[in-house]
Amino acid sequence: MGNPPVEVAIAVLYQQGRFLLQLRDNIPNILYPGYWAFFGGHLEPGEDAFTGVKRELLEEIGYAPPRLDLFQRRMSNTIIRNVFHGPLTVPVESLQLNEGWDLGLCSIADVRRGACYSPKAQEERPLGPPHQEILLMFLEHYPSFDT
């Protein structure tokens, strides 16, 4: 018998038809180094997913969304992803990046082609495959999102 799955809570935050993503640090010992991903992270022992995602957003970017709704709970043998979504109601420039290499708003076109430009990296960087998949599912579920 293997280890129980790791449980995380992540946030799909959006503003004016674009998604806020974190460019993960480009260090080899983390999952998806140098890839665009969501803000969020592991739940603390005994912590529910909603509390965890709010804590992670405050820790990582100093942001408390006025609203977060559960989009989906994705389970595999190794990870449970609690995916929340909500609006980014402040300018990106007012966010405080406390974890990661960069942050930015990626367009729907960026999501579809799987890459987004990073001013700090001064190049396009790929979206993490599960993150792109979740965003594509989000766009499919909310077809009027970009209107």
Image (cartoon, helix red, strand yellow):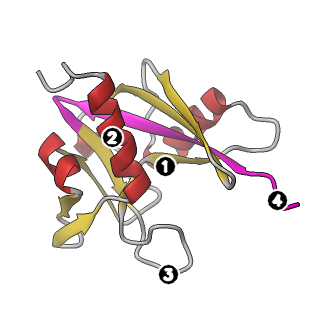
* Image side of residue 3 versus residue 128, left or right: right
At label 3, the amino acid type is Pro
The reply to whether the magenta stretch includes residue 14 is: yes
In the picture shown, does residue 68 fall above or below 45? Answer: above
At label 4, the amino acid type is Asn
The reply to whether the magenta stretch includes residue 51 is: no
* Residue at disc 4, secondary structure: loop
- State the residue position of label 3: 28
Residue positioned 33% across, 50% down in the render: 132
In the picture shown, does residue 12 fall above or below 41? Answer: above
Q: x and y percent of residue 63 in the render?
A: 43, 35
**Image quadrant where residue 15 sits:** top left
Q: x and y percent of residue 99 in the render?
A: 47, 59
Query: Disc 2 versus disc 4: distance between alpha carbons?
Result: 28 Å
**Residue at the outermost bottom position:** 28
Task: Work out whether mark 2 precedes mark 4 in sequence or the reverse, and give the earlier one.
Answer: 4
* Image side of residue 10 versus residue 107, left or right: right
At label 1, the amino acid type is Glu
